[in-house]
Image: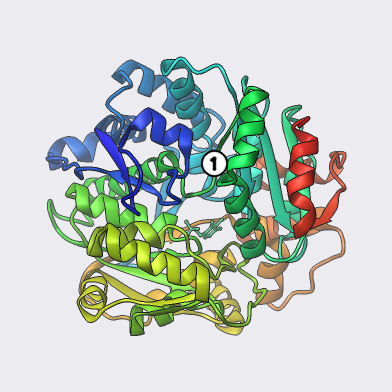
Amino acid sequence: MKFQSTRGNAPAVSGLQALINGLAPDGGLYVPQAFPKIDFNWDQLAKADYFQIGQLVLSTFFDEFSQGELADFLHQAYAQFDRPEIVKVHALDGKRQLLELFHGPTLAFKDMALSLLPYLLTAAVKKTGQKDVLVILTATSGDTGGAALQGFSDIGQTQIVVYYPSVGVSALQRQQMTTTPGQNAHVVAVEGNFDDAQRVVKKLLADPELAKQMQTAGLRFSSANSINIGRLVAQVIYYIYAYAQLLKSGRLKSGEKLDVTVPTGNFGDILAAYWAKKLGLPLGKLTVASNANHVLTDFFASGIYNAKRDFHVTTSPAMDILLSSNLERLLFDVAGAEKTRHWMADLADKQTFTVDDKTLDLLQQSFNAAFADVDQTSQTIKETFRDHDYLLDPHTAVAVYANQQFTTQRQQLIVSTASPFKFAEIVLSALGQKPADDPAANLKQVAQIAKLPVPAAIADLFTKKVRFHEQLTIDQLGEDLKASLGL
Ligand SMILES: *Cc1c(COP(=O)(O)O)cnc(C)c1O
């Protein structure tokens, strides 16, 4: 299996090389040259566990790894999860189920892919005979940073650099990143928002001068951002697993369609659902759920992507994004490389692009889109707890709200991307309680309300020593990066 760039101006590469490169040299994202299909056997699928489905998906995309290697990666990756089944499908009522993807070490769905990626990447480096140290350069809106630091902590032949926005991340997210024990880590707060940080990271990743300097020093960039093909493929697994669980419980009949709603930021998670559907999983409509930064809601309604607008810091910070990188892969899929290249050039030049009617029609056939503002999000947390005795995190609440905007007869899968413990202050406020100044006290309060123990992964987080205090401007990042790499 080979991978090509969405912009059509870079050579096709093996899966191993696509994993290592992160971004294609023409600035595009890697996608399969011929999209694979899986011939699902529903009876077998209903009996399969997460690891078996993981092997099936990974071997479909990355044929360079043996089944034994893949089984090994999967078991090591998910050893730290707090449930043996890795993810949980929770029935909210007769028609809606939540897919809980937050049982990993940082309590958000980023762990699903970022626990696995280091194994795929380091094995890819070994298999291609490369000796360079991989520099994982990451811009985060809050959750990727923590999960990447966790996943790559002291993994040999890697350095990990994380830039997070100084405003918008929660106390817990900041604490997770700045107390990371990894000796191969460098963590910096950036004055600005996520889009600013991501733009600089993309520029650094594509800087030929810097690449040369790094090469001389035996270093090489890779990316743990959701543009990395390894992250996307890892996320396809849980849609198939969720479908299998619903077959097993009798909620779905073999081949019956399932609608999916995903709280969306960079468009990685929902694109993985789209890829699961392309593989042959019977999914119905995919609903893109956004917060007050609803660029995508507007785009799916009008065909106009307009990032030139005010940026809102909301209660669902992982979705405070105006440039959804993985949308490029969807555009490529429906309209091809040439149009995608033009739209991405327009976006870079003018912060906006407009797709043609045919493309918009194709997009609307597959996707719904809706958004929830901060009040609607908080109201949804309150009502869901009152009516179903279940505590939603704010990102998942955005998705539950968006899901309610559309009526269908089909079963609904709503992706739950974070634990309510991770956003304790927001959840408590939504329930009409006053959060304490002490974040640890708020965790206890959430535990009492949800009737759940504080997750072991964060139980002693606020007693850990902060190792990284630095805060820099966007313009300082290039120099900071060089200094941290000894260039
Ligand atoms: C990253 C994140 C999202 C958005 O996922 P994308 O793949 O970027 O669309 C939603 N919720 C949480 C909690 C996240 O961490």
Q: Nearer the viewer, residue 135 or 411?
A: 135
- Can residue 97 be seen from the camera position used here? no
User: Image check: 255 left or right of 340?
Assistant: left
Quarter of the image that includes the C terminus: top right
Residue 288 on image: x %, y %: 39, 70
- Residue 332 % position (x, y): 29, 59
Amino acid type of the residue tagged 1 in the rendering? Ser
Q: Residue at x 23, y 81 (%)?
A: 357
Q: Judge whether 106 appears above or below 368 on screen.
A: above
Left/right placement of residue 114 relative to residue 212 reads left
Which residue is found at the position 34% from the left and 49% from the top?
9
Looking at the rendered image, the quarter that the N terminus falls into is top left
The residue sitting at 35% across, 35% down in the picture is 50
Which residue is pictured at 31% across the width and 80% down the height?
A: 406
- Residue 319 visible from this viewpoint: yes
Q: Classify 135 as above or below 5.
A: above
- Would you place residue 280 above or below residue 411 in this image? above
Please tell me in which quadrant of the rendered image residue 165 appears: bottom right
Query: What is the quadrant of residue 128 in the picture?
Result: top left
Relative to 111, does residue 274 appear above or below in the rendering? below
Could you say which is closer to the camera, residue 476 or residue 275?
A: 476
Q: Which residue is mark 1?
A: 223
What sort of colour scheme is used for the picture? rainbow
